Image (cartoon, grey):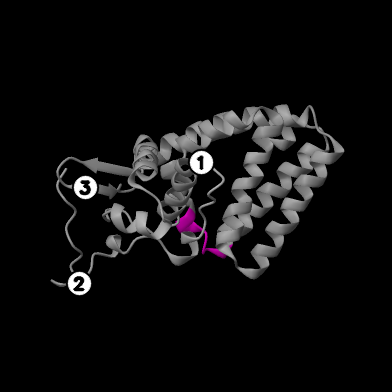
Amino acid sequence: MPRPRKNASQTEGEADPGLLGLPAALIDMIDPALPKTSQVYGIMRHAIVNLHLSPGSSVNEKLICDQLGISRTPLREAILQLQSENLVAVIPNSGTYVSRIDLQSVFDGQLVREALELKVVRLAASRMTPQFERALDFNLHRQHRMWSDHDYTEFYKLDEAFHAMICAFGASAYVWKIINSAKAQLDRVRWMSYPLVSHLDVVLKEHMAVVDGLKQRDPEAAA
């Protein structure tokens, strides 16, 4: 795979946008008390999915290590995880690049997600508890608030947390881990649609319908 070309609007001497590293909002997120690799993976994945690191851009390992105050080892381990999800491509004698969005992977991710989540939400409906109802209501309340504020970043986080909660309750956190890995390419497409208010309306209404079905202990209505 050849090194990605510069954009037509990018003149000689200008910095490649992909070499600018991580956005400031993500830099202070490393907790020294927790394993570094998983944290770096989460930060990098967030930056790629939210298009802070754009498709085709170069990953500047040295700059990112300097920004996060880490050695190369946790970053490279995180890159291996991202590579397994087809979010980055490691090119020998060239470097690491953010992968282009692959439509087949988007389709596959949607297929895996729908199949597993439909099963999980049915299981969750059969074992609902008052405590879990309250947790869902709290998440949904916050989704409404972020929707009203047009805070797409926080809405996305709550959207992810909503599905992760149901997976953990209906089956296990491991099931969400499988889904999360399979939908990596899909997530970038989802993020691009978030600024569309009509899309957020649809997502919010779908979540409300899921919660209503779960509260009724009705597997089919929840699914």
Marks 3 and 2 sit apart, C-alpha to C-alpha, by 19 Å
Percent of width and height locating residue 99: 30, 47
Task: Give amino acid for label 2.
Answer: Glu
Marks 1 and 2 sit apart, C-alpha to C-alpha, by 36 Å
Q: In the figure, 76 relative to 50: above or below? A: above
The circle on residue 179 is: none
CB contact under 8 Å: marks 1 and 2: no
Q: Is residue 186 visible?
A: yes
> Is-magenta flag for residue 4?
no
Q: Quadrant of residue 167?
A: top right
Q: Secondary structure at mark 2?
A: loop
Q: What range of the chain is rendered magenta? A: 191-197
Q: Secondary structure at mark 1?
A: loop
Which of the two discs, 3 and 2, labels the residue nearer the N terminus?
A: 2
Which of the two discs, 3 and 1, labels the residue nearer the N terminus?
A: 1
| Quarter of the rendering occupied by the C terminus | top right
| Quarter of the rendering occupied by the N terminus | top left
Q: Which residue is mark 2?
A: 14
The circle on residue 95 is: 3
Q: Image point 52% across, 56% down: which residue?
A: 29
Closer to the camera: disc 1 or disc 2? 1
Which of the two residues, 183 or 70, is positioned nearer the viewer here?
Answer: 70
Percent of width and height locating residue 197: 57, 64
The extreme right residue here reads: 130
Q: Which residue is mark 1?
A: 35
Task: Give amino acid for label 1.
Answer: Pro
CB contact under 8 Å: marks 3 and 1: no
Q: Image point 60% across, 59% down: which residue?
A: 154
